[in-house]
Image (spheres, rainbow, N blue to C red):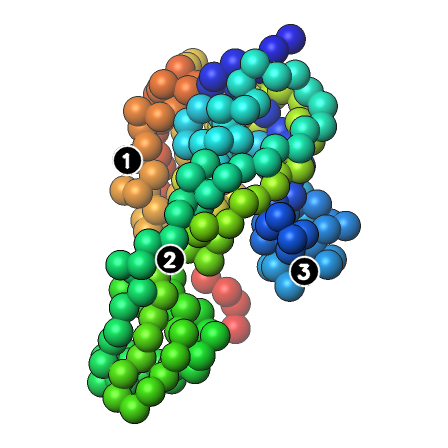
Amino acid sequence: MALQKKDFIEIEFTGKTKEGEIFDSNVKENLDKTNLSTKAKPLIFCLGEAMFLKAIDDFLIGKDTGEYKIELQPEKAFGKRDSKLVQMIPMKIFIQHQINPVPGTMFNFDNKIAKILTVSGGRVMVDFNNPLAGKDVIYEVKVLRKIENIKEKAKSLIDFFTRKDFKFEIKDKKIFVETDKQFAQFLILFKDKFKQLLDLDLEVKEVEEKKEEK
């Protein structure tokens, strides 16, 4: 049966540059070849809901379970390089942020990932382009199965939105999620998504965090 938009699917995938450098994967065999900290476990996501690269979403809609090799040009992957995103920043800015600028290193600058290109006197040349911008990439994707179980779907949404494994219960067209105060107001922002994708009304129950015993 062909996959449709809003279907939940489970996949294994590996993203590579055209030269063969692996930049993303959830397959243990391929992760062992990199220094990525990603865990080797299948990914569950909803097709057509911006939970994965759009070009992969578009490709998989209409396909079936199986293995696919998807070649993407920059405009369909991580965009073309933009010369305006290569900027000169005064050294004093780095000092204020307690950053030691070393050519070749990556850092988070006001929630933007950047790469230091050169350091010369009191000036630092910084590249805010995505490291994969301007590159052709290849994704090897294995669609393992279409998810039918509502609990698996709900768990995947909670994980996608919070990167946490919260307890939850589904009852009478409602999903009750137990979360600490830190995430309660954040999770409720996705109330419409749970209704749209799972036809469930989201209710969040705040629970106190367990304190570690000394």
Please tell me whether residue 194 is drawn above or below residue 40 in the rendered image. above
Three-letter residue code for mark 1: Leu
Residue of label 2:
129
- Name the foreground residue: 68 vs 170: 68
Q: Which mark is on residue 189? A: 1
User: Residue 92: x and y, percent?
Assistant: 22, 85
Apparent side of residue 167 relative to residue 17 in the rendered image (left or right): left
Residue drawn where x is 53% and y is 18% of the image: 61
- Name the foreground residue: 152 vs 175: 152
- Name the foreground residue: 114 vs 45: 114
- Corner quadrant of residue 199: top left
User: Residue 180: x and y, percent?
Assistant: 38, 48
Q: Earlier in the sequence, mark 1 or mark 2?
A: 2
Q: Earlier in the sequence, mark 3 or mark 2?
A: 3
Three-letter residue code for mark 3: Thr
Position of the N terminus, as image quadrant, is top right
Residue drawn where x is 52% and y is 73% of the image: 214
Total marks placed: 3
Q: Which of the two marks, 1 or 2, is nearer to us in this view?
A: 2
Residue of label 3:
34
Q: Secondary structure at mark 3?
A: loop
One can see residue 121 in this view? yes
Residue drawn where x is 49% and y is 24% of the image: 58
